[in-house]
Amino acid sequence: MDLQDQLKNLFPDHQPSHEVEETSSEPKELWVQKEPMICKYEKRKGKATTIISGYTGEDEDFKILAKEIKSKLAVGGSFKDGEIIIQGDYRDKIMTILKDKGFKVKRVGG
């Protein structure tokens, strides 16, 4: 007895739908600004952090960008007060990711 038969026994009145849900797999186009974004290094509570700020677009776009950076680098971080905070010193890698996307980036500190 397979799973479909078990489900039919549990729910005899149920009619399964054969509709295919469409999901948008293409990434959302981010707004690229003319002013450079600021990528700086700080130590917070003794730990190294990389902070990206200066994005003038929508917060939702900036959150998408934060999620993409965190997943590409496989690190933790957060989005708070219009800044992306990444755990660790990843300025060089972040700057190359942002430049590949078409952003201008300015390195601050060190």
Image (tube, helix red, strand yellow):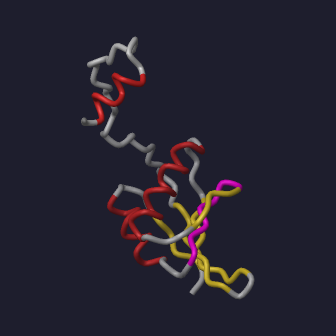
Q: In the image, what residue occupies the spot 57% across and 53% down?
A: 55
Q: In the image, what residue occupies the spot 55% across and 50% down?
A: 63
**Does residue 40 show up magenta in the picture?**
no
Seen from the viewer's position, the closer of residues 99 and 68 is 68
Question: Residue 49 location, x and y as percent?
Answer: 61, 77
Image quadrant of residue 17?
A: top left
Question: Residue 32 location, x and y as percent?
Answer: 44, 48
Magenta stretch: give its range: 81-87
Q: Is residue 59 left or right of residue 68?
A: right
**Does residue 86 show up magenta in the picture?**
yes
Q: Is residue 98 left or right of residue 20?
A: right
Question: Residue 43 location, x and y as percent?
Answer: 68, 83
Is 89 above or below relative to 54? below
Seen from the viewer's position, the closer of residues 63 and 35 is 63
Seen from the viewer's position, the closer of residues 75 and 89 is 75
**Quadrant containing the N terminus in the rendered view:** top left
Image quadrant of residue 101?
A: bottom left
**Quadrant containing the C terminus in the rendered view:** bottom right
Q: What is the count of numbered marks?
A: 0
Q: Identify the residue at the far right of this view.
A: 45
Q: In the image, what residue occupies the spot 36% across and 27% down?
A: 7
Q: In the image, what residue occupies the spot 57% across and 75% down?
A: 87
Q: Is residue 18 left or right of residue 84?
A: left
User: Magenta region, mostly helix, strand or loop?
Assistant: strand
Image quadrant of residue 40?
A: bottom right
Question: Residue 8 location, x and y as percent?
Answer: 34, 22
